[in-house]
Structures are given as C-alpha cells and as structure tokens.
Image: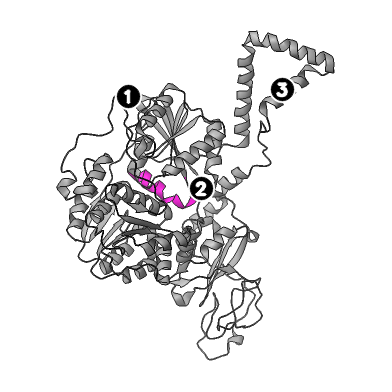
C-alpha cells in the first residue's frame, strides 16, 4: 500500500504483563470478523493488529455495508466506527480501477489524518492500494501528484475537497462509497453547504454511510435527502477508565507543545513516563528533542525491530530510561509498573485509544497521572472523552516561571547537598579553592558562584518572569471559546449579562485587522461557514475571529493583526460555497460615496466610519439598512446619531 506522507504499518510490541497480572485482551466472544464477511488480506491485517472481536458498531455496520445498504449511525467517537466503514470499503476495493472509489469526509485535518492512518494499517496486507489524505495546510503539489498517479481512497476535509473539485483535479465519477464521519461536528463548523455540493457531484448510485455522535434535525434532513433507505444503527460506548488515574488536559497549540511538555517535565514528580504521539516519525523527532534538553528518552514504533523494542522497554523497567515516546500500536500490551505518568502529546480522536493509553499507568492499585495536550480546534474531543469515560478531565495550567525556578533551585540545593556528602572528593577540592583564594584575594562565596557558572554553562539557571512568551501563548490558547453566539445573536438574557464580568479579557479592537473575502449574502454565506472554513484551512482558533460583516458581494472578517504570512498563504486558495475567497487585507477607506472597480463590485473598505452602512449602488444595502417602501432615492435614507449595532454571528 502507498500513501503520500504515510509511514509503514506498525505491529504491536510483544511484552509480558506484570503487576496485577491482568491481560490486555479478553477471550473472543460472539462472531469474529470472518463471520461478518471480512476475509483475505484485510482479515490478516486486522488479526496482525491484535483485533479479535468486533465492537458493537462493527457487528451491526459491516454486514450492511458489505451488502450494499446505506447506513445512518449514531455512535460516539471511540466505539470503533472507523473500522466499521473502512473494512468493508477495503474488502470491496477494485485495485484495477485507478479513479477514487471511496471518499471519507472528516471535519478536521487531525481526524482526516487519523482515519487515513487507520486505513493504512487495515490495508497493510494489500499491496497496490493507494490512499491520499487531502486537507488544508498541506501543499497542493503532493496531493496533485498523487491524484494524477491515481488513488483508490481519498480522506479529506470538505474545504480542500471542494478546492480540488473546483480545479477539476479530483474525479469522483467512479465513486462507489462515501462516508461522512463526525457529521454533526462538520455541520457545526459551517461545512453544510460544502458537504451538499460535494454530495451533488457524486454518482447517484453510490453507497453512503453517515456517522454522527448526535442526531440533530439538520443531520436527519441531510440523511433523508442523500441516503437511500438507510439502516439506522445506534450504539452507546461502554468505555470506562481506572478511578486511580488523575486525568488532566492543557489546551496548547501544536507549535508550543514541545516547550509546554518540557516545562511540565520540570515540575512534575514522575518516575517513568510514556508520551504518546500520532505518527512513527514523531516518536523519533520528539525523543531526540527531549534528549537534547537533558532527558533520558527513547522511541518505540513499528519500524524499530522487535528485539530493540524489548530492550528499550527493559531499560524503562530497570530505571535506565525515564521517558518512552510511543505510538498506540507499538505500545499495545505494555505493562510497566514504574510508569507513573502518561502524556497524550497528540490526543487520539478514538476514545478507545485514549482509554488504552492512560491505562498504561495506575496499574496494580497504584495511582497514576494522565495529561493530554489538546489544540484549540480539538476542544470538542473533550466531550467525547467525558461521555465515553464518564469522567471529566480537569483543565490544568501551564507551570509558571516561578514554579520552574522553585523546582530548579530545589534541585540545585539537592545537588550541592549530595556533593557535600562525598567527603573524600571535597577534601581534594578544598585545597584547590583555598589556593585560589590566597593568590587572587577573592572571597570564597564569589569562587563558589563562579564554579556554579562553570557548571551551569551558557543556559541560565532561572527563567525570566518578565520574558515568558510561552505562558502568554498558552494563556491565549486556553482562553475559553466564545460559546453561545447563537443565543447572543438573538439577544442576551440576564444570565449572559451576569456572566460578562467573569469572562477572560478579549482582544481589543486594535488587535484585529479587517480582511476582505469575495463571498457574501448573494452566495448564501453565513458567519459560521466563514469561521469553519478559515479555521480549518488556516489552523485558526475561534478566538482569532473578531467581527464578521457579510455584504451582498463580499464579507469583512476581523483577524489578528499579528497574523502570520504563512496562514494567509494557506488561505488564498480556500473556497467557501464553491467560490475562491481571494482573501486580502481590507483597504480601510472611509465611506466616501459609491466607487466601483472594473468588475462592477463595491470597492470600499472597512475603514473607520460612524455607521456600518455602505452607500453602494444596485440595491447594495448595508448591514443595518432596510429597504424603503417608497421610491425615494438612497441618499435620502434615515440618518440619526444612534450608534451602530455590532453585528453578531453564530459559531
């Protein structure tokens, strides 16, 4: 199997359970995968992964999809639904057909990558299968090259899929299977119209599987329109976690993860630790970075030979190694009593994987700690974890510079105390120091400080509280999302007003810059679509958005003034409702009367103006303008001194 940016399939590590003597897999009960119709190389691959008994959603879904039925599934993340739709797709795949036969739509690039990796592992015994993840933020070159060569399965986000359809680079004419994964999240992010346009460009006789954690009316309407006599399946997760494990999470952007992990390692009192990441390449990269920062760390993944993995695990057991950086499959069955902490450096979208990961600690009645890093756009996964585990992880704060400095000073004191106990060596150095003091007339205290500088090297012992960009960045990531916009758009109630005082401080108006995008009311665009598309393609958080003003032909979006140029580059080819948004900084010209560019579009900017109205021609009304019932000219519209109402938009 080949996949652009893919890594080889992993195999579980072979370890012997210790501690409480519990085993990781139970005896098979009920029908096996072969009884459901899975056979040949697909069956061999999942058995190699250690899968023996299908989950409830898999038992219900696999026979239906193999039989050609459409499926409408209500299932939480973590119930095994990825395998429920991936295995039938692979079982029915025609390797001779080079046009895409299956398309899986996911709301975020993280979920798209995880689904693609699952397909990759299930197709490990099927040489010649070509899989392509398609998502925003990745260059088009890799995706275009793979599409030209031919792919069997495409997994992607709606925005980037729409881009390829608009460019004519993605041919769905031979599509046989279409899967909507996490459909409710997809619609919440504003992809409803994109999803419908994608569905409209696929063959009518395709098979559709729609999975959603909830079943709101919008999902029902979508299913009624695009699914043919679907079989409804509802499965509730039964996942629970050990009560001895303390679960915490930190909201942190990907760019700050390594620094945040380093700071946590400095203050947490841990014995042994496993850090889980999503890919094999990341295990090596992160382990190397931790070693460079002075930690005893090693990686285990499917590319490392089994004997070497066993030696690494042995070192962790013996205390010769403190941190193990691992992937899910490579650490399957791992049971080391010394592990006190588990860190989800990359949070899994599958709650079964989450439970398996944190179960590596808290063994044999011991207590354990689980810390999960969650990017701002992965907040929704917390709800899945809470529902599946019936426990609510506590939000933690990044250790402050004062916390780190206190820990460093305590360790410095301990190091001095330990050195003083080596009386034999102390005697030898005492004469050397006394000789230096006599010949240079320097106080012994100064000599001790100078030796501390020599021992410390160029790295400062203490952090500067006045220069702490990491804390500022993480604090911004941990700022609660501006929820309940839908309620506020209809008017704030008294509870909203009472809560206003306790909300974290938001950016001031000067922290935002207006950007113009070439979609508006005439294209049936809503604020939530704009937020969803820009957040998904540009990697923005919800707090990165200021006011959104939708005009007939274009819209104005306030984005952070310090927006990185690379984000704009990623957004330039973004489409909303099938149209290229052509994002650019708004000129900010004040309202000076109607002006037109050569395309006949209102050219005025978003500059400082007393009102949010625009005097555009051709019935181009402003945000707060209402059509008059008479034929009076537009220049005679009502004018008063009332302040404009701030436009509100929904999440």
Colouring method of the image = one colour
Relative to 458, does residue 485 appear above or below in the rendering?
below
**Circle 1: element type:** loop
Could you tell me how far apart the alpha carbons at marks 2 and 3 are, in whole angstroms? 38 Å
User: What type of secondary structure mainly makes up the magenta span?
Assistant: helix
**Circle 2: element type:** helix
Mark 1 or mark 2, earlier in chain? 1
Magenta stretch? Answer: 374-388
Could you tell me how far apart the alpha carbons at marks 1 and 3 are, in whole angstroms? 46 Å
**Circle 3: element type:** helix
Residue situated in front as seen by the camera: 393 or 87: 87
Residue 243 visible in this rendered orientation of the protein: yes
Q: Would you call the spot at circle 3 few (<14 residues within 10 Å), some (14-19), or many (20 or more)?
A: few
Please give the residue where the numbered disc 1 appears in the rendered image.
18
Closer mark to the observer between disc 2 and disc 3: 3
Left or right of 291? Residue 125 is left
Residue situated in front as seen by the camera: 504 or 267: 267
Name the residue rendered at 52%, 74% in the picture.
554
Closer mark to the observer between disc 1 and disc 3: 3
- In the drawing, what numbered circle is on residue 451? 3
Count of picture labels: 3
- 2 and 3 marks in contact (CB < 8 Å): no
Q: Would you call the spot at circle 1 few (<14 residues within 10 Å), some (14-19), or many (20 or more)?
A: some
- Find residue 594 and report its horizontal and vertical position in percent: 62, 83
Relative to 1, does residue 313 appear above or below in the rendering?
above
Was residue 386 drawn as part of the magenta stretch in this picture? Answer: yes
In which quarter of the view is residue 507 placed? Answer: bottom right
Name the residue rendered at 39%, 52% in the picture.
113
Please give the residue where the numbered disc 2 appears in the rendered image.
254
Could you tell me how far apart the alpha carbons at marks 1 and 2 are, in whole angstroms? 35 Å
């Amino acid at each position: 199997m080949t996949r652009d940016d893919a890594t080889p399939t992993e195999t579980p590590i072979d370890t012997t359970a210790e501690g409480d003597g519990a085993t990781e897999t139970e005896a098979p009960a009920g029908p096996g995968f072969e009884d459901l119709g899975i056979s040949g190389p697909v069956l061999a691959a999942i058995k190699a992964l250690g899968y023996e008994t299908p989950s409830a959603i898999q038992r219900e879904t696999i026979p239906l999809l193999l039989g050609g039925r459409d499926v409408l599934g209500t299932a939480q993340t973590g119930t095994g639904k990825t395998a429920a739709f991936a295995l039938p797709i692979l079982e029915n795949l025609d390797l001779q057909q080079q046009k895409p036969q299956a398309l899986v739509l996911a709301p975020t690039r993280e979920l798209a990558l995880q689904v693609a990796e699952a397909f990759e592992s299930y197709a490990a015994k099927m040489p010649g299968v070509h899989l392509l993840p398609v998502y925003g933020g990745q260059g088009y070159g890799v995706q275009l090259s793979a599409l030209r060569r031919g792919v069997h399965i495409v997994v992607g986000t709606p925005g980037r899929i729409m881009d390829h359809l608009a460019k004519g680079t993605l041919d769905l004419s031979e599509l046989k299977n279409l899967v909507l994964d996490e459909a409710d999240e997809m619609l919440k992010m504003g992809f409803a119209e994109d999803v419908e346009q994608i569905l409209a460009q696929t063959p009518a006789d395709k098979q559709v599987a729609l999975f959603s954690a909830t079943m709101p009316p919008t999902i029902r309407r979508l299913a009624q329109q695009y699914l043919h006599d679907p079989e409804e399946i509802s499965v509730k997760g039964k996942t629970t976690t050990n009560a001895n494990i303390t679960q915490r999470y930190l909201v942190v952007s990907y760019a700050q993860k390594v620094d945040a992990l380093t700071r946590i390692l400095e203050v947490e009192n841990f014995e042994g630790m496993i850090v889980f990441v999503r890919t094999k390449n990341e295990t090596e990269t992160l382990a190397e970075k931790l070693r460079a920062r002075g930690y005893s760390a090693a990686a285990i993944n499917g590319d490392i030979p089994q004997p070497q993995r066993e030696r690494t695990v042995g070192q962790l057991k013996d205390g010769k190694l403190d941190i193990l950086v691992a992937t899910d499959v490579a650490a399957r069955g791992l049971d080391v009593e010394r592990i006190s902490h588990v860190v989800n450096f990359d949070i899994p979208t599958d709650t079964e994987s989450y439970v398996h990961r944190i179960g590596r600690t808290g063994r044999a009645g011991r207590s354990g700690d689980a810390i999960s890093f969650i990017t701002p756009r992965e907040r929704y996964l917390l709800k899945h974890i809470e529902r599946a585990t019936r426990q609510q992880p506590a939000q933690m704060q990044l250790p402050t510079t004062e916390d780190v400095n206190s820990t460093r000073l305590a360790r410095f004191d301990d190091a001095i105390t330990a050195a003083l106990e080596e009386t034999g060596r102390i005697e030898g150095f005492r004469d050397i120091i006394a000789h230096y003091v006599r010949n240079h007339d320097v106080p012994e205290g100064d000599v001790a400080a100078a030796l501390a500088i020599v021992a410390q090297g160029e790295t400062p012992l203490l952090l500067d509280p006045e220069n702490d960009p990491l804390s500022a960045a993480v604090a911004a990531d941990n700022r609660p999302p501006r929820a309940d916009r839908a309620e506020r758009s209809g008017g704030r109630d008294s509870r909203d007003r009472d809560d206003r005082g306790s909300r974290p401080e938001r950016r001031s108006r000067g922290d935002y810059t207006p950007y113009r995008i070439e979609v508006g009311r005439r294209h049936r665009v809503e604020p939530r679509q704009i937020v969803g598309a820009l957040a998904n393609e540009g990697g923005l958080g919800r707090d990165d958005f200021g006011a959104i003003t939708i005009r007939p032909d274009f819209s104005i979006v306030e984005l952070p003034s310090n927006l990185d140029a690379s984000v704009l580059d990623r957004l330039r080819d973004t489409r909303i409702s099938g149209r290229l948004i052509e994002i650019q900084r708004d000129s900010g010209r004040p309202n000076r009367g109607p002006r037109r560019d050569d395309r006949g579009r209102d050219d005025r900017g978003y500059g400082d103006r007393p009102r949010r109205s625009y005097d555009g021609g051709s019935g181009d009304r402003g945000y707060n303008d209402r059509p008059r019932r008479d034929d009076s000219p537009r220049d005679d519209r009502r004018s008063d001194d009332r302040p404009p109402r701030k436009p509100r938009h929904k999440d």
